[in-house]
Amino acid sequence: MEVKYLNDGNISDKKENEINEEITILSVREFCKSSFAKIENFFYENFSYSKLELYDEYYYITFVIPSLDVNSDSTTKFSLLLGSKELVFIDDTNLSLDIIGKLITVKKKFKSVLDIFSFFLSELIKDDYTKLESYEKTFAKLEIDILDEKIKNASREIVEIRNKLIEEEDYYEQIEDILLKLLSDDNGFYDNSNNDALNNCLTRIKRLNSHCKSLRDYGNQVRELYQTQVDIQLNKIMTILTVVSVICMPITLIAGWYGMNFKNMPELDYKFGYLIIIGITILLIIILIIIFKKKKYF
């Protein structure tokens, strides 16, 4: 296997194993100046999602990797040309360079360029389980905090994580589609008798996709729990307001009744009339409070 790093027009070679596959890593600017840019019908586009297209004797694969950071909307973009014996990365980041650097040191015999691509993809997604587990732990913590009434506004955080999971789900489905097309290999570029590495990658991608769906459902459950707790709190407030309103109703009635000031109201001239009305009012309040306590309204 021969690996070529092309930086500012300088090519450095590093050879490992005894396979004839060649790997080249180019920046976008370097790629535009290389012979690959002259492939018939080939065009380098500002791609917005991961996909696989056929150009002459190469598969052109684009990667758009969403950030798993909830506070970031950034994506990592790069592409590659996959031939029968050749792998060309078009990458302005160091991601491809870092992974291929690990590939060189691996004591493993790669049977084909698809095995190399499978290794690259495995390294690309190896930390995704850990990142998805962090979302699961966040949901679990939010769930406990909601039940303990320690959090006032969890809706925004839940929605942000769920939106990230939707992005990841779309990404994994796109990668799954790429792998299925490579496994079918309608153009007959590869020997499909042994595609274990590619099938393993496909299995891992499907598991990640399934995990995203499960986490999204979990997020919906946490959001429903939060909404339920909000409704419970609202019901408590409405109950208190109702109790206060009912207690105040007799007082309002009495105040309105004796506020009419008719001449023939004997209570107005009675010496202890004022004290009697105060006593009746206090008695009614006590009776209503006892009734509400028995009914467990508060």
Image: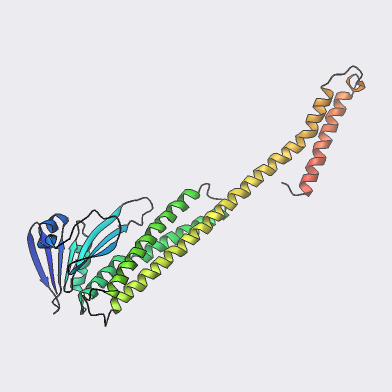
- Identify the residue at horizontal 80%, vertical 26% (top origin): 255
Residue 80 is left or right of residue 156, and the answer is left
- Identify the residue at horizontal 19%, vertical 63% (top origin): 89
Which quarter of the image is occupied by the N terminus?
A: bottom left
Residue furthest top as drawn: 263
Colour option used: rainbow
Q: Nearer the viewer, residue 136 or 118?
A: 118
Vertical relation: 190 (above or below) 24: below
Residue furthest front as drawn: 41
Instruction: Report which quarter residue 234 is drawn in.
Output: top right
Residue furthest left as drawn: 10
Q: Is residue 126 visible?
A: no
Count of labels in the image: 0
Q: Where is residue 263 in the image (x, y as percent from the top left)?
A: 90, 16
Q: Which of 55 and 84 is in front in this view?
A: 55
Instruction: Report which quarter residue 8 is drawn in.
Output: bottom left
Vertical relation: 146 (above or below) 22: above
Q: Where is residue 116 in the image (x, y as percent from the top left)?
A: 22, 73
- Identify the residue at horizontal 41%, vertical 60% (top origin): 134
Residue 213 is left or right of residue 224, and the answer is left
Q: Can residue 264 be seen in this view?
A: yes
Residue 35 is left or right of residue 128, and the answer is left
Q: Where is residue 126 in the image (x, y as percent from the top left)?
A: 32, 68
Q: Nearer the viewer, residue 62 or 286?
A: 62
- Identify the residue at horizontal 46%, vertical 62% (top origin): 215
Q: Where is residue 112 in the image (x, y as percent from the top left)?
A: 20, 77
Vertical relation: 298 (above or below) 183: above
Instruction: Report which quarter residue 200 is drawn in.
Output: bottom left
Q: Nearer the viewer, residue 29 or 135?
A: 29
